[in-house]
């Protein structure tokens, strides 16, 4: 929960994430390596007086995260690193860029997916499903309503309306002065008791959450290589990832990273 006196600071951190994404739009193009993209993000962090809240992040069983940003291309769902491949971006690639900052003690954490100089019909439909599911999901995050309303809205759009697959086992999270906090926010409705224990907890004013649908064309399952960070679709199908920072207020949800919706899907033209 965030106190009213801290809301401006949290808003400023989220604004830094949006600013870096806006600058990145003019940088992404065919031929760019993931290492070059991460170096660009690192320079923007310094310029905005931020630090990465991803680089060096530790999870049991994993080495410290090596990159300033998460760079996930095509079948990589999330947690892609700058050194997972030396292959430069090519026309038609989809890349999710997840940027996490610490600014004056507060976290901002949001991701967007871009197509490099265009994509096929399937890729365009997948990106549209990701954006729209984020929008309708945020609209459902009303104070006094259960967290599961988010998942109902997202799952209805992605799986029922669009026919794509929400990746299981990954979801959103609370945040604030630390990157991860309660509650966990699943993208799908629980199917058995205990699957998502917080599903029927209520959205309350003062909650700060990063919500993030992760969508694949052909599977709900993922794979990873040993203890490495990147997480891929189990069947190698295309994936997208969109994430927003949301503050719950008495009047409803406020998307602190709403500016991401103004960004182009296609970059590098």
Image (cartoon, grey):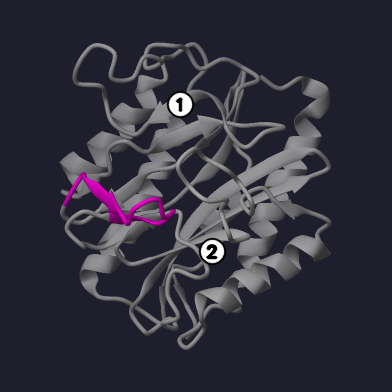
Helix, strand or loop under label 1? strand
Which residue shows up at 32% across the image and 57% down it? 225
Classify mark 1: residues with Cα within 10 Å, few (<14), some (14-19) or many (20+): many
Q: In the figure, 106 relative to 40: above or below?
A: above
Position of 58 with respect to 120 (left or right) is right
Position of 13 with respect to 173 (left or right) is right
User: Who is closer to the viewer here, 65 or 113?
Assistant: 65
Numbered label attached to residue 205: none
Distance of label 1 from label 2 (alpha carbons): 27 Å
The image position of residue 249, as x and y in percent, is 63, 22
Position of 219 with respect to 101 (left or right) is left
User: Who is closer to the viewer here, 90 or 25?
Assistant: 90
Numbered label attached to residue 184: 1
The answer to if 227 sits in the magenta stretch is: yes
Residue 127, picture quadrant:
bottom left
Which residue shows up at 44% across the image and 14% down it? 145
The image position of residue 28, as x and y in percent, is 53, 78
Q: In the figure, 23 relative to 152: above or below?
A: below
User: Who is closer to the viewer here, 35 or 264?
Assistant: 35
Task: Report whether residue 23 is seen.
Answer: no
**Mark 2 lies on residue:** 263
- Please report the bounds of the magenta region as a residue range: 219-232
Q: Main secondary structure of the magenta part?
A: loop
């Amino acid at each position: 929960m965030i106190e009213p006196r801290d809301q401006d600071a949290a808003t400023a951190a989220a604004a830094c994430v949006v600013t870096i994404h806006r600058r990145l739009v003019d940088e992404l193009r065919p031929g760019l390596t993931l290492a070059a993209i991460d170096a660009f993000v690192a320079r923007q962090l310094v310029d905005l007086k931020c630090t990465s809240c991803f680089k060096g992040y530790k999870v049991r069983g994993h080495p410290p995260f090596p990159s300033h940003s998460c760079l996930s291309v095509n079948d990589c769902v999330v947690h892609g690193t700058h050194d997972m491949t030396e292959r430069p971006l090519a026309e038609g690639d989809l890349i999710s860029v997840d940027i996490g900052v610490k600014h004056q003690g507060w976290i901002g954490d949001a991701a967007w997916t871009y197509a490099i100089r265009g994509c096929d019909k399937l890729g365009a439909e997948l990106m549209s499903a990701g954006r729209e599911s984020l929008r309708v999901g945020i609209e459902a995050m009303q104070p006094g309503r259960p967290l599961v309303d988010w998942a109902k809205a997202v799952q209805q759009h992605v799986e029922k309306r669009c026919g794509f697959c929400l990746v299981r086992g990954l979801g959103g999270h609370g945040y604030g002065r630390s990157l991860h906090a309660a509650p966990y926010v699943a993208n799908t409705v629980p199917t058995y008791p205990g699957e998502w224990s917080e599903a029927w907890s209520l959205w309350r004013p003062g909650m700060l959450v990063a919500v993030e649908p992760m969508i694949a064309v052909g599977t709900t399952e993922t794979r990873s290589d040993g203890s490495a960070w990147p997480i891929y679709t189990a069947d190698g199908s295309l994936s997208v990832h969109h994430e927003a920072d949301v503050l719950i207020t008495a009047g409803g949800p406020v998307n602190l990273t709403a500016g991401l919706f103004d960004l182009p899907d296609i970059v590098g033209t």
